[in-house]
Image (cartoon, grey):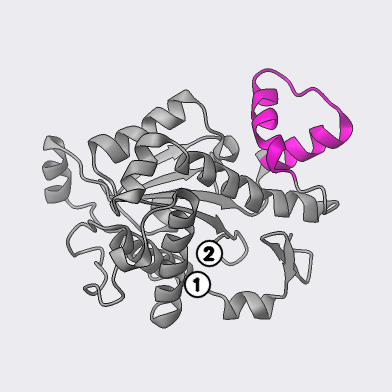
Amino acid sequence: MAKHQRRVVGGRYVSPVKLRRDDHLRTGTGRRTFLRAAVASSAAATGGLALGTIPASAAPPATSSGPRPSTPWQALDELAAGNRRWRTFHQQHPHESRSVRNALVSGQHPFAVILGCIDSRVPPELVFDQGLGDLLTVRSAGEVLDEAVLGSIAYGVLELEIPLILVLGHQSCGAVAAAVHADESGEQLPAHIQYLADQIRPAIDYSQHGDARVDSTVNRNAGLVRRRLAAEPDLAAKVAAGELAIVGARYELTSQLVHALD
C-alpha cells in the first residue's frame, strides 16, 4: 500500500492529507472525538452502551504511571496515548520494574483485550506502549475467531472484568492477502492455512481490485470480527450494561498510527 499515493480506508480512497486530518488517536479534542465514535460504534452493534454512559466530562485519562483504566472510555484513552508515544518515539516502556514484576505474581488486572494478528510487526504491547499486566493479548492470523480465541476473550471480559476489546487489523496483512489471492485463483492452501482463508473470505471486498481489494478487506475483516464478537450473548450483555466496548481498529505500518474503523 505504501506505493499508492492514496490509501483505502473503510473501502474508500482517502488522501494522506485527509488521513492526517482524521488522526483520531491524537491527544486532545481529536482523540476524544475518536473515543466517542468508537464507543458509539460498539453500542450500535449491540443496541446498548449509549454515549451518555461514558460522559465527556470523565476524569483525565490514565497514564502509564496512573491507576488502571476501569471504563471503556479510560481504556481507549490510555491506548490512544500509548500509540501516540509509540509513533512519536517517546515510549515509556511502563510497568517493567522489579516491584511490578513482584506484584504481578499474585494476580493480573489488564485493562484491555487486544485481538490482533500474529504478524511480528504488530506487537500490541509495543504499538500501545504498555507493559506487564496491562493488556490481555489474543493473536491469530487475520484475527480469525475460533473456540480457543472466543474462550480467551471471554475469560478476559467475564473473569478479569476487562472493559474493552479492541480488534486490531493492520496494513499489509499476509493472512488477508493469502485469503484474497486464494479466492481469486481457486487455489487450495496447505494444511490449516485454508481454514484461515475460509474464515476471512466473507470479508473480501469484491468492489475493489488488486492491492486495493486486499487493503479494503483488512478493514472489512476487522469490522466483521468485531460484529461477531458483539453478537456473543455474554459480551453483548456487558456492552448493554455499559461495562464493555468492542472496537475495530487498524494499524498502519507506514505511520505506526492506530485509527478506528467504521
Residue at the disc numbered 2: 259
Rendering coords of residue 28 (x, y %): 38, 81
Label count reads 2
Q: Is residue 248 left or right of residue 102?
A: right
Could you tell me which secondary element the residue under label 2 belongs to?
strand
**Magenta stretch holds residue 199:** yes
Q: Which sits earlier in the primary sequence, circle 1 or circle 2?
A: 1
Q: Residue furthest right?
A: 185
Q: Type of residue at label 1?
A: His
Would you say residue 153 is visible in this rendering? no
Could you tell me which secondary element the residue under label 1 belongs to?
loop
Mark 1 neighbour density, 10 Å: few (under 14) some (14–19) many (20 or more): many
Rendering coords of residue 73 (x, y %): 32, 63
Q: Quadrant of the N terminus?
A: bottom right
Would you say residue 147 is visible in this rendering? yes
Q: Quadrant of residue 194?
A: top right
Mark 2 neighbour density, 10 Å: few (under 14) some (14–19) many (20 or more): many
Q: Is residue 234 left or right of residue 193?
A: left
Q: Give me the C-alpha separation between circle 1 and circle 2.
A: 6 Å
Task: Give the camera-side residue of 115 and 163.
Answer: 163
Q: Is residue 188 placed above or below 138 in the rendered structure? A: above
Q: Are marks 1 and 2 in contact (CB under 8 Å)?
A: yes
Task: Using the image, tell me which numbered label, if any, was put on residue 57.
Answer: none
Q: Is residue 208 left or right of residue 193?
A: right
Q: Main secondary structure of the magenta part?
A: helix
Task: Using the image, tell me which numbered label, if any, was put on residue 24.
Answer: 1
Q: Residue at x 35, y 34 (%)?
A: 154
Rendering coords of residue 183 (x, y %): 81, 34
- Point out the stretch of residues depicted in magenta: 176-204
Q: Residue at x 79, y 56 (%)?
A: 212
